[in-house]
Image (spheres, rainbow, N blue to C red):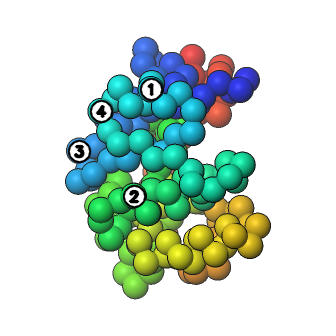
Amino acid sequence: MGGRDKGLVPYRGKPLVDHVIARIAPQVDELLISANRNLGDYARRGYRIVTDALPDFPGPLAGVLAGLQAASHEWVLVVPCDMPQLPEDLARRMAAASRDASIVIAEDGVRSHPAVMLIHARLAQALADYLAGGKRSVHGFQESVGFAKAVFDPDEMANINRLDEAG
Protein backbone atom coordinates (compact mmCIF):
# COMPACT_ATOMS: atom_id res chain seq x y z
CA MET A 1 0.00 0.00 0.00
CA GLY A 2 2.99 2.27 -0.39
CA GLY A 3 3.21 3.03 3.32
CA ARG A 4 -0.40 4.20 3.50
CA ASP A 5 -2.59 3.28 6.43
CA LYS A 6 -4.46 0.35 4.89
CA GLY A 7 -7.69 0.93 6.79
CA LEU A 8 -7.98 4.44 5.35
CA VAL A 9 -7.33 3.44 1.73
CA PRO A 10 -10.45 4.15 -0.36
CA TYR A 11 -12.38 1.20 -1.75
CA ARG A 12 -15.61 1.72 -3.67
CA GLY A 13 -15.88 5.29 -2.46
CA LYS A 14 -15.10 4.89 1.22
CA PRO A 15 -12.19 3.75 3.39
CA LEU A 16 -11.67 0.01 3.82
CA VAL A 17 -12.28 0.28 7.56
CA ASP A 18 -15.79 1.64 6.93
CA HIS A 19 -16.68 -1.42 4.86
CA VAL A 20 -15.46 -3.70 7.64
CA ILE A 21 -17.33 -1.73 10.31
CA ALA A 22 -20.54 -1.92 8.27
CA ARG A 23 -20.19 -5.71 8.09
CA ILE A 24 -19.08 -6.37 11.67
CA ALA A 25 -20.87 -3.79 13.88
CA PRO A 26 -24.32 -5.43 13.50
CA GLN A 27 -22.84 -8.78 14.54
CA VAL A 28 -21.15 -7.80 17.81
CA ASP A 29 -22.06 -6.12 21.09
CA GLU A 30 -18.84 -4.12 21.24
CA LEU A 31 -16.59 -2.92 18.44
CA LEU A 32 -13.01 -1.85 19.08
CA ILE A 33 -10.60 -0.49 16.49
CA SER A 34 -6.95 -1.42 16.87
CA ALA A 35 -4.78 1.36 15.47
CA ASN A 36 -1.38 2.89 16.11
CA ARG A 37 -1.49 5.90 13.80
CA ASN A 38 -4.10 8.27 12.41
CA LEU A 39 -5.97 7.81 15.68
CA GLY A 40 -8.15 10.87 15.09
CA ASP A 41 -9.32 9.51 11.74
CA TYR A 42 -10.34 6.24 13.36
CA ALA A 43 -11.87 7.90 16.44
CA ARG A 44 -14.26 9.87 14.21
CA ARG A 45 -16.01 6.60 13.49
CA GLY A 46 -17.39 6.59 17.03
CA TYR A 47 -15.80 3.42 18.36
CA ARG A 48 -13.20 2.97 21.07
CA ILE A 49 -9.63 2.86 19.78
CA VAL A 50 -7.08 0.50 21.30
CA THR A 51 -3.37 0.88 20.68
CA ASP A 52 -0.52 -1.57 21.17
CA ALA A 53 0.82 -1.55 24.71
CA LEU A 54 4.02 -3.25 23.56
CA PRO A 55 6.93 -1.21 22.24
CA ASP A 56 8.09 -1.21 18.61
CA PHE A 57 4.73 -2.30 17.17
CA PRO A 58 5.48 -6.04 17.08
CA GLY A 59 2.78 -6.91 14.57
CA PRO A 60 -0.86 -7.94 14.48
CA LEU A 61 -0.74 -10.07 17.61
CA ALA A 62 0.05 -6.98 19.69
CA GLY A 63 -3.22 -5.50 18.44
CA VAL A 64 -5.05 -8.73 19.27
CA LEU A 65 -3.59 -8.63 22.79
CA ALA A 66 -4.64 -4.99 23.23
CA GLY A 67 -8.14 -5.92 22.08
CA LEU A 68 -8.36 -8.87 24.47
CA GLN A 69 -7.25 -6.67 27.34
CA ALA A 70 -9.72 -3.90 26.46
CA ALA A 71 -12.77 -5.98 25.54
CA SER A 72 -15.59 -6.41 28.00
CA HIS A 73 -16.62 -9.81 26.65
CA GLU A 74 -15.16 -13.33 26.94
CA TRP A 75 -14.99 -13.85 23.19
CA VAL A 76 -13.40 -11.38 20.77
CA LEU A 77 -13.91 -11.49 17.02
CA VAL A 78 -10.78 -10.25 15.25
CA VAL A 79 -10.86 -9.14 11.62
CA PRO A 80 -8.36 -7.19 9.53
CA CYS A 81 -9.25 -3.88 7.91
CA ASP A 82 -8.56 -5.15 4.39
CA MET A 83 -11.47 -7.59 4.01
CA PRO A 84 -14.42 -5.45 2.90
CA GLN A 85 -16.76 -8.32 1.97
CA LEU A 86 -16.77 -10.31 5.19
CA PRO A 87 -19.91 -12.40 5.67
CA GLU A 88 -22.83 -10.77 7.42
CA ASP A 89 -23.04 -13.87 9.64
CA LEU A 90 -19.31 -14.21 10.32
CA ALA A 91 -19.61 -14.01 14.12
CA ARG A 92 -22.39 -16.59 14.29
CA ARG A 93 -20.58 -19.05 12.04
CA MET A 94 -17.28 -18.61 13.89
CA ALA A 95 -19.02 -19.18 17.25
CA ALA A 96 -20.79 -22.28 15.90
CA ALA A 97 -17.40 -23.75 14.95
CA SER A 98 -15.79 -23.12 18.34
CA ARG A 99 -16.74 -26.42 19.98
CA ASP A 100 -14.09 -26.81 22.73
CA ALA A 101 -11.44 -24.62 21.08
CA SER A 102 -10.39 -21.23 22.45
CA ILE A 103 -9.62 -19.96 18.94
CA VAL A 104 -11.50 -20.38 15.70
CA ILE A 105 -9.90 -19.29 12.44
CA ALA A 106 -11.51 -18.77 9.05
CA GLU A 107 -10.60 -20.73 5.97
CA ASP A 108 -12.07 -20.71 2.50
CA GLY A 109 -11.43 -24.24 1.33
CA VAL A 110 -8.22 -23.11 -0.39
CA ARG A 111 -6.32 -21.35 2.35
CA SER A 112 -6.52 -20.33 5.99
CA HIS A 113 -7.11 -16.75 7.09
CA PRO A 114 -5.51 -16.64 10.55
CA ALA A 115 -6.13 -12.89 10.89
CA VAL A 116 -9.87 -13.66 10.98
CA MET A 117 -10.31 -15.29 14.34
CA LEU A 118 -12.64 -15.69 17.25
CA ILE A 119 -10.50 -15.83 20.38
CA HIS A 120 -11.37 -16.35 24.03
CA ALA A 121 -10.12 -13.82 26.58
CA ARG A 122 -8.59 -16.63 28.67
CA LEU A 123 -5.77 -16.70 26.09
CA ALA A 124 -4.61 -13.14 26.87
CA GLN A 125 -1.80 -14.29 29.17
CA ALA A 126 -0.67 -17.05 26.80
CA LEU A 127 -0.56 -14.47 24.01
CA ALA A 128 1.37 -12.00 26.18
CA ASP A 129 3.89 -14.74 27.01
CA TYR A 130 4.20 -15.71 23.34
CA LEU A 131 4.96 -12.10 22.39
CA ALA A 132 7.33 -11.65 25.34
CA GLY A 133 9.28 -14.62 23.98
CA GLY A 134 9.91 -12.68 20.78
CA LYS A 135 7.48 -14.67 18.68
CA ARG A 136 5.27 -12.80 16.18
CA SER A 137 3.53 -15.37 13.95
CA VAL A 138 -0.26 -15.21 14.13
CA HIS A 139 -0.64 -18.75 12.86
CA GLY A 140 2.24 -19.90 15.06
CA PHE A 141 0.40 -18.68 18.15
CA GLN A 142 -2.80 -20.32 16.99
CA GLU A 143 -1.00 -23.62 16.45
CA SER A 144 0.64 -23.36 19.87
CA VAL A 145 -2.74 -23.29 21.64
CA GLY A 146 -4.83 -25.26 19.15
CA PHE A 147 -7.74 -24.01 17.09
CA ALA A 148 -10.91 -24.96 15.26
CA LYS A 149 -11.81 -23.86 11.75
CA ALA A 150 -14.87 -22.23 10.24
CA VAL A 151 -15.21 -22.62 6.47
CA PHE A 152 -16.36 -19.78 4.23
CA ASP A 153 -16.66 -19.08 0.52
CA PRO A 154 -13.46 -17.62 -1.01
CA ASP A 155 -15.37 -14.49 -2.14
CA GLU A 156 -16.26 -13.73 1.48
CA MET A 157 -12.60 -13.85 2.46
CA ALA A 158 -11.20 -11.66 -0.34
CA ASN A 159 -8.71 -9.12 0.91
CA ILE A 160 -7.24 -5.98 -0.59
CA ASN A 161 -3.44 -5.99 -0.47
CA ARG A 162 -2.45 -3.49 -3.16
CA LEU A 163 -3.59 -0.03 -4.17
CA ASP A 164 -4.60 -1.27 -7.62
CA GLU A 165 -6.97 -3.79 -5.97
CA ALA A 166 -8.64 -1.00 -4.01
CA GLY A 167 -9.54 0.74 -7.25
Task: Report which residue position mark 1 lands on.
Answer: 40
Task: Report which residue position mark 3 lands on.
Answer: 26
Asked if residue 95 can be seen in this view, the reply is no
Choose the circle earlier in sequence order: 3 or 1: 3
Residue 139's x, y, as percent? 65, 65
> In the rendered structure, which amino acid carries the disc numbered 3?
Pro
Residue 97's x, y, as percent? 38, 72
Quick check: marks 3 and 1 in contact, CB under 8 Å?
no
Mark nearer the viewer, 2 or 3: 2
Relative side of 129 to 81, left or right: right
> In the rendered structure, which amino acid carries the disc numbered 4?
Gly
Query: What kind of element bears circle 4?
Result: loop
Q: Residues within 10 Å of mark 2 (few under 14, many from 20)?
A: some
Task: Report which residue position mark 4 lands on.
Answer: 46
Quick check: marks 4 and 1 in contact, CB under 8 Å?
no
Q: Quadrant of the C terminus?
A: top right
| Residue lying at 32% horizontally and 47% vertically, measured from the top left | 31
In depth, the one of 80 and 96 nearer the eye is 80
Give the quadrant of residue 111: bottom right
Task: Report which residue position mark 2 lands on.
Answer: 70
Residue 148's x, y, as percent? 49, 75
- Residue 14 vertical placement versus 87 (above, below): above
Query: What kind of element bears circle 3?
Result: helix
Q: Residues within 10 Å of mark 3 (few under 14, many from 20)?
A: few
